[in-house]
Amino acid sequence: MMTTKNDIVLVVDDSADALSLINDTLESANMDVLVALEGKQALTIAKRIRPDIILLDAIMPNMDGFETCRALKADANLAAIPVIFMTGLSDTDDIVRGLEAGGVDYLTKPIKPNELIARMKVHLNNARLTNSAQLALDSTGQHLMTVSDAGHIEWATPQTYALFAKARATDDWQQTDMAMQLRLWLSQNPAIDSRIELHNLDYPLSVKMINNQTGQERLLKLEDGKRPTGPHLLKQKLDLTERESEVLHWLANGKTNRDIAQILDMSPRTVNKHLEQIFPKLGVENRTAAAGIALKVLAND
C-alpha cells in the first residue's frame, strides 16, 4: 500500500511558547516538524534534512531571520525552499525587508493556526509545481538554462553542464567571460528565438533565447556548434534520404505541404510522395505520428 510522505517543516523561533503552539498546529495537520532556536542552527538542520518549507522568525538574537534567509537563498541546494516570515512587527519596511531577503510570504504574530495552515498549503503546492516543472525540463534531454540579468546561470539541465564540459567551458569562464557576453546581449532585450555566438572558446557554442522577461530569470538554450543540423540528424537517426529528412524536418516544424514545397522548391505533390515513403520507414500512418518521432530525435540528441 502506497503511503504519502508528510511535509517537513522547519520552524525557527527563539520563543519556546511560539514554537510549542506552532508545533502542535503543524502536527495536527500531519506535518513533520523540525525546530531551531536561532539562524545558524536552522542552516545546519536544513543542510542535513532538507525541509519542504521554512517558518522563520524575523527578529532573533545573533543571526536574525533576514540574514538567515539570505544565507538559505545563497545555497543552491536550499534556495528553492519557500520561506514564510513570522514577525510581531507591523512596520511595512520590515515586511518588505523580509520579502527582499527571499521570503515568499509573512505572518504577523500572534500566529492564527488556520491562517498558518492555509498559507503554507498554498506555498507548498507552488513549490511542488515548480519542482515538477524543473524535473520535467531536466528529463527532456535539452540544453536549457535560466540566467539572471547579470548573465549568471541560476539553473541548468544536466545536459547543459555536459555540453559546457565537452566545450571545456570552465566555471571561471562561465562566471566571467560568458556572463559579460550574456549581460550585454540581454541589455538589448533580444527577441524570442534570437541567438548569440559565445566567444573566447576553442569549441563553438551559441545561446538561443527561449523566454525573455526583464527583471526575471531568462530561459535560454545552449547550442552545440558542431552538432549536425536538424535534417542531418533525421537522416542519420532514421535512415532517410536527404530529401526525405528535409521534408520531415519542416513537417516537425509545423509546416503544411504547400509551405514545405515553397521552402524546398518542389511541388506539393512531390512533398506528398516523399511523405508516402517516410511513413512506412518510420512505422507510422500519419503526419502527427511522424512529426512526433522527428521531434523526439531532435530533442534528445
Image (cartoon, rainbow, N blue to C red):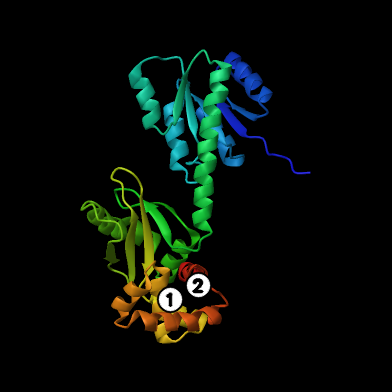
- Extreme residue toward the left, this view: 188
Q: Of the two numbered discs 1 and 2 on the same chain, state the one appearing first in sequence.
A: 1
- Residue drawn 26% across and 56% down? 191
Using residue 252 as the reference point, say whether residue 92 is left or right of it: left
Indicate the amino acid at tag 1: Leu
Q: Is residue 115 above or below residue 78?
A: above
Query: In the displayed image of the protein, which residue is found farthest to the bottom?
Result: 241
Q: Is residue 69 left or right of residue 262?
A: right
- Give x and y (percent) for residue 26: 63, 24
- At 47% from the left edge and 43% from the top edge, which residue is drawn? 75
Residue furthest to the right: 1
Q: Are marks 1 and 2 in contact (CB under 8 Å)?
A: yes
Percent from the top left, x then y, of residue 34?
63, 30
Q: Which residue is mark 1?
A: 248
Q: What residue would you read off at disc 2?
A: 290
Give the percent coordinates (x, y) of residue 243.
39, 84
Q: Residues within 10 Å of mark 1 (few under 14, many from 20)?
A: many
Circle 2 residues within 10 Å: few <14, some 14–19, many ≥20: many
Instruction: Please name whichever residue, 86 or 129, is drawn nearer the observer in this view of the structure.
Output: 129
